[in-house]
Amino acid sequence: MSEVEKVRLSLDEVAALSRAILTRHGLAPRHVEAVTATIVAGERDECASHGVYRLLVCVNTLNTGKVVKDAIPVVHDVAPALVRVDAGGGFAQTAFEAGLPSLVEKARANGIAAFGINHCVHFAALWPEVEAIAEQGLVAFACTPSHAWVAPAGGIKPLFGTNPIAFGWPRPGDYPYVFDFATSAVARGEIELHRRAGKPIPEGWGIDSEGQPTTDAKAALDGAMLTFGGHKGSALATMVELIAGPMIGDMTSAESIALDAGVGSSPIGGEFILAIDPAGFLGAEAAGHIERAEAVFDAITGQGARLPSQRRFEARARSLANGVHVPRQLYQDVQALLD
Ligand code: NDP
Ligand code: PYC
């Protein structure tokens, strides 16, 4: 897309736009700040499906009445290595912020700790969360179901959510190693962006409502998305349904979309997060072993391959220096949310 079709914004301008829109649609200040931080981070790291575009999704969700706009997350200290936050029907980001200090403290005290977020509305990428945990020197894992949009490998009916899995590993003197991807071939947001742009989707992302392969974004959105890696992504998506659904007393993607009843809210349910302190296994030897792990990353980049999040961290540096470039049509659609 040419420069003419994009609007350049500073990160402060993105934040101000997000705050104004979310406030205009009745979201309480604490949630406005937490959601804005995610949206700015997504746009800053050039994660188009989870940046400024998400303001459209967020406002749509606010207007469905499915999110509690002034929810107060409640932290439950359920066991020495377990923390649970009841999001009270609010956005997941605020619940994550509420439980993070306890998760970190418990992981340091016990070597490992788990965090269940319940009763939240989730529209976000998971990398900001695993990155925040890894920045504390801990190994992190996070996953969440979404809405039943994805067919199991060998089937044609939507059952799984796009169910992202994220992992973070602390690196001395560097950004953490982080990956974060949907267990579907691609996030639904990416297909939505193709639909908005009138672009075909690659084969392998979705099937139409008859179960036939399609490159038409709308047909795939109306039919079913596909898992990545066939049966492997399908099994990982099942794992996410289980450990971030029934295991923490929360919804599966099928239950979430049933509750949605066609209004088009973001997914409602839970999230499961794990933090591991390498010092729990290794004591004073932890630093040496973490240092030794660097050889793995060197061997990846040393042969010309790139690390996950490398693109994102490069984009971050660009955006911090120069701001971001939002497609003009998207900018106009988002501005219209202020009317
Ligand atoms: P991608 O398929 O683009 O995969 C993203 C991950 O793979 C990133 O860590 C990315 O790093 C890395 N990656 C991409 N290409 C390469 C490469 N060539 N070599 C090494 N690593 C690579 O993302 P998805 O569409 O699957 O997901 C996008 C986002 O959507 C995620 O952040 C996810 O959390 C979010 N999502 C949220 C859901 C929810 O319910 N809350 C549901 C589904 C998705 P990099 O960023 O540096 O390119
Ligand atoms: O892009 O699949 C997605 C998604 C679902 C919830 C948040 N993002």
Image (tube, rainbow, N blue to C red):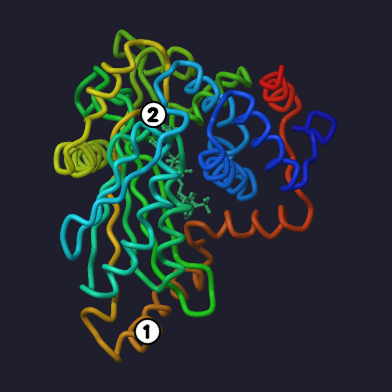
> What residue sits right under mark 1 in the picture?
292
Amino acid type, residue under disc 1 in the picture: Arg
Q: Nearer the viewer, mark 1 or mark 2?
A: 1
Q: Residue at x 34, y 61 (%)?
A: 140
Image quadrant where residue 27 sits: top right
Left/right of residue 52 with respect to residue 202 in the rendered view: right
- Mark 1 vs mark 2: which is more N-terminal? 2
For disc 1, the neighbor class at 10 Å (few under 14, some 14 to 19, many from 20) is few
Above or below, 236 against 334 in this view is: below
Cα distance, mark 1 to mark 2? 38 Å
Above or below, 190 against 242 in this view is: above
Q: Which residue of the protein is positioned furthest toward the right in this rendering?
A: 4
Amino acid type, residue under disc 2 in the picture: Gly
Mark 1: secondary structure: helix
Image quadrant where residue 253 sits: top left
> What residue sits right under mark 2 in the picture?
204
For disc 2, the neighbor class at 10 Å (few under 14, some 14 to 19, many from 20) is some
Q: Residue at x 66, y 20 (%)?
A: 337
Q: Residue at x 44, y 72 (%)?
A: 297
Distance from mark 2 CB to nearest ligand 1 atom below 8 Å = no
Res 245 label: none
x and y percent of residue 235 in the render? 19, 40
User: In what quadrant of the picture does the C terminus appear?
Assistant: top right
Q: Residue at x 28, y 24 (%)?
A: 256
- Nearest the eye: 269 or 44: 269
Distance from mark 1 CB to nearest ligand 1 atom below 8 Å = no
x and y percent of residue 334 in the render? 68, 25
x and y percent of residue 258 in the render? 26, 16
Above or below, 110 against 147 in this view is: below
Mark 2: secondary structure: loop
Left/right of residue 332 with respect to residue 285 in the rendered view: right
